[in-house]
Image (cartoon, helix red, strand yellow):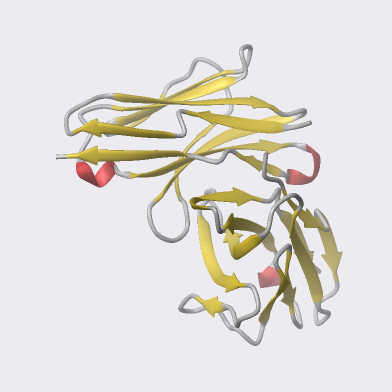
Amino acid sequence: GAVVSQHPSRVICKSGTSVKIECRSLDFQATTMFWYRQFPKQSLMLMATSNEGSKATYEQGVEKDKFLINHASLTLSTLTVTSAHPEDSSFYICSARMLARQETQYFGPGTRLLVL
Amino acid sequence: EDKVVQSPLSLVVHEGDTVTLNCSYEVTNFRSLLWYKQEKKAPTFLFMLTSSGIEKKSGRLSSILDKKELFSILNITATQTGDSAVYLCAVEANTGNQFYFGTGTSLTVIP
């Protein structure tokens, strides 16, 4: 089946540093990738939608200069949290959608970010 | 290999019908199982289950977990067109706080 991986699974960094999270579709081409952030009580917030080769579409309230998304190939999207602060500490999850099955999203396992 | 499998993949029912969605899992270091409803944007959290046999209920929705048989069901009674959505099941593992999502069940409720 379609598999999506994320790397790293967990990262701890100092305040002010930048952190890059990778999302890869391992056995299919992902025309669209989504980035989510988990908030307390398990809710997920969509941060942005990225299509390969074009700029990401950010949801209202998400700072595009702080959360840089690059979808350079059909199998890789990256989320860079720039100048991270403790309030950015969260669980970030990506999902991918393939062209042939637009109705299905394949989720990655998530990345736990802790900013000290 | 850790995995979560949902069935059926899709379902079409009439308003007023009762539906049961299934989620089976094979995840080491199980921590919790979560159900989400996804309509347009982000999945909306429905339930979190950690213990076997205890039914969680919210209006017409209910869910139960069987940790021995490694599955959960989500029941929706008296379905309405507004219940049409993709229902996602996810299992959280203790190791690294990783999530394993199923691919969802697409439910369509027709008037």
Q: Is residue B107 above or below residue A102?
A: above
| Residue A55, position as x, y percentages in the image | 60, 83
Is residue A85 visible in the rendered image? The answer is no
Left or right: B90, with B9 as reference point: right
Depth order, front residue of B60/B3: B3
**Residue A17: image x %, image y %?**
83, 80
Where does residue B78 sit, x and y in percent of width and height?
20, 29
Q: In what quadrant of the picture does the C terminus of chain A appear?
A: bottom right
Query: Which residue is farthest top?
Result: B68
The image quarter containing residue A49 is bottom right
Frontmost residue, B103 versus B66: B103
Name which residue lies at 61% across and 81% down. A54
Q: Residue at (79%, 45%) from the top-left corner?
A: B96
> Eyeballing the image, is B17 above or below A74?
above
B35 left or right of A76 in image: left
Q: Is residue A57 left or right of residue A74?
A: left
Residue A36 visible somewhere in the drawing: yes
Q: Which residue occupies the extreme front position in the image?
A: A100
Q: Is residue A79 placed above or below B108 in the rendered structure?
A: below
Q: Is residue B45 above or below residue A61?
A: above
How many numbered markers are drawn?
A: 0
**In this view, which residue lies farthest toward the left?**
B111
Residue at x-position 75% and y-position 81%: A82
Residue A24 image offset from top left, x and y in percent: 75, 58
Residue farthest to the bottom? A65
Image quarter of the N terminus of chain A: top right
